[in-house]
Image (cartoon, coloured by chain):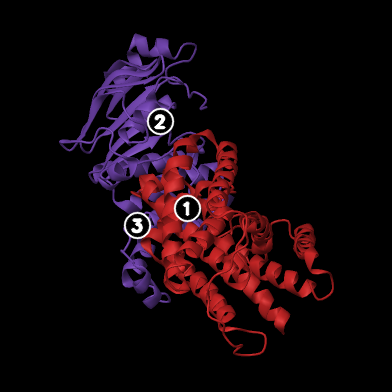
Amino acid sequence: MESIVYGIVTASIILLGSVGFSMTLNAENFINIAHGQMLLLCAYITLFLNAYMSIVPAAIIGILVTGVFGVLFYKVFYRPIKKRGAMVLLFTSVGLAYVINGVVGTIFGTTTFAYKIPNVKEIIPGMTPYQLLIIIAAICSTLFLHYFLTKTKIGKAIRAVSENSDLAKTRGIDTKRTSNYVWFIASSLAGLSGVFLGVIGSIHLEMGWNQILIILAATVLGGLGSIYGVMAASVVIGLSMELGVLMIPSYYRLAIAFAIIIIVLLIKPDGLQSLWNKSGKRVA
Amino acid sequence: MLEVQNAKKYFGGVKAVDNVSIQVKKSSITGLIGANGAGKTTLFNMISGFIPLTAGTVIYEGEDITNQPAYKISTKGIVRTFQTPLGFPRMTVMENMLVFAKNRNAGIFTAIKTSKKVTPLEEEYIERARKILKDVGLGNKEDAWVSDLSAGELKILEFARPLMADPHIFLLDEPAAGINPANLNSLVTLIKDLRNKGYTFLIVDHNLKFIMNICDYIYVMADGKLIFEGLPDEVANADCVIESYIGKKKTEDTVSN
C-alpha cells in the first residue's frame, strides 16, 4: 500500500514536470534540457523564501517567479536564435541548464537542504496530508490544462501555433504572446514539481539533472509531444519505479523505469498515445 | 483597396524585390506572374507582414500597414495562402475550418461551465464550414485527418479555410499548382463567383493559362523588378513577357516548382 501511494506521488511529480516539458516541445519544437533546472530553481527560491515565511506562500511566490524566469529565459536566450533550428536551441538549453545549476550552486553551496514544514500525522496508513496534497495538485493541474488547451481561446491558439505557426499568424494569432503563455505555464508547472520533490525528499543540486532524465523518459514513452500520452506515461513510470523497489534494490529505480520504456516502445513505437489515437494521429 | 508603393527587399546584396509598386482594385482579380525567383512570394510575404520591407509602403483601405506583424494584418481582412500547404496536420478538415471561424472569447471558467455544450454559434460555424467544403468539393472529407489528404486536396483546403474568416482580400500563393484539371475548373468558377460577390483577389502563379483565364489585370515581375503590367491580352502579346519565359510558349502550362 505504501509503495502504491508512493508510486502515485512520484507519478504526480513526474507528471507536473513532464507536461510543461511537452508543451515547450510542442510549441517550440525543441528539447529544452534546461526544463529540469527550472524544478531546481523553484525548489531553491522556495527554500530561500521558506526562511522568512511558511512553506505555502513561499511556494506560491516561488512558482510564479519561476514562471516569469521561464518567460525571460525564452525571450533572452531562445527566441533570438529560434530561426537557427532545433539543434542550436537544444545546445543553448544545455548551456543554460549548466548556468542555472552553477548560479544556484554558488549561492546555496552543495549541502542538502530540507524545507521547514510542520510534522504531520498520517491520515491513512502510508499517506501524509502532504502526499495527498501533491496528488490533488497534480490532478487539478491536469484538469486545468485540459480545459485550458481544449476550450479557451488562448489554449486553442497555443495548439494552433504548435501545429503550424505561420498558418496561425494568418488567422490573427499573436504567436509571441502564445509563446509567453506556454513558457510561463510550463515553467510554473516545473516549479510546482520541484517544490513537491523538496517536500517529500530533500533539496540538492542534482535534482534537476535526475528529473530531466525521467521527464525525457516520460515524454518518449507517452509519444513525443503528446500531452495526454505523457500523463499516462508519468503514471506508468512512477508506479513501476516505486513498485519495482519491492523486488530490486532501490538504487536501480531509474533502471526499472527505463527497462519498462524499452519494452513499451518495442511493442508500441509511437508511445502510449497510440493506444487511443488509432490512426496514429495526436490530438494534443 | 491595396496599394504597394516602391517596395524594396534586399537580402544582403540580393535585391529580391526592387522598387515594385502595384495596385489591387476592389472586387478585382489581380495576377502577379514571373519566373522562379522573380520575387513574387517575397512581395507576398511583405504585404502579409511575414518579412519586413527594406523600404516602401503598403497601404490597405487608406491605412498604412507597412511592417505591421502578420497576425495584426490578418485581422484587418487580408488573408493569404501558402505555396506549400500544410494546414494543421493533426486536426481534421472540419477542425481546420473551425480554427478560422471567429472565436468566442472563452476564459477558463466559461470553458469549464460550457465544456459539454455545443453553442448555437458553434453550430452555425459548423454549418457554414460544411457549406464551404461542399462548394469547393471537399464535402466528403469533413472528418478526414489533414495529414491524410492528397496534395491537391490540401491545396483546396488551403483556399477554403480563409473563407471561414470572412476576409476582404485574398492573397493566393500558387493556388493552381498541383491541382488536377477538374478541381482547377471548379476553383476558377469559385474564385470568379466570389469576385462577383465583391471579394478581392491577388494571385501569384506560374500557370499562365490559369492566370490569363481568371485575372482582370496582371503584373509581370522578373529579377525583383516589375517589367510589365496590363490587361491579360496585352500581357499575352508583350515581347518582354515572352522573353522572361524564354523557351516556353506564352500559353503553355509551365511546370511548377
Q: Residues within 10 Å of mark 2 (few under 14, many from 20)?
A: some
Residue A109 horizontal/vertical position (percent): 58, 53
Q: Residues within 10 Å of mark 3 (few under 14, many from 20)?
A: many
Please tell me how many numbered marks the rendered image carries. 3
Give the left or right position of residue A24, taking residue B2 as reference: right
**Residue A81 versus residue A148 in the image, above or below:** above
Q: Which residue is at 67% across, 57% downward?
A: A210
Residue B231 horizontal side relative to residue B160, left or right: left
Quarter holding residue B22: top left
Judged by depth in the image, the label closer to the viewer, 3 or 1, is: 3
**Which of the two residues, A108 or B90, is positioned nearer the viewer here?**
A108
Q: Earlier in the sequence, mark 3 or mark 1?
A: 3
Q: Chain of mark 1?
A: B
What residue appears at the point 76 percent right and 65 percent down from the top-left corner?
Answer: A253
CA gap, disc 3 and disc 1: 18 Å
Q: Does the residue at mark 2 contact the one at mark 1 (Cβ under 8 Å)? A: no
Tell me where residue A151 appears, x and y as whole percent.
41, 67
| Colour of chain B in the rendered structure image | purple
Q: Name the element at disc 1.
A: loop
Q: Earlier in the sequence, mark 2 or mark 3?
A: 3
In the figure, the red chain has which letter? A
Q: Amino acid at mark 3?
A: Ala
Sequence order check, earlier mark of 2 and 1: 1
Q: Nearer the viewer, residue A222 or A151?
A: A222
| Kind of residue indicated by mark 1 | Leu
Name the residue rendered at 40%, 42% in the picture.
Answer: B187
Residue occupied by mark 2: B210
Can you identify the residue that label 1 sits on? Answer: B138
* B49 left or right, relative to A236: left
Which residue carries the number 3 mark? B101
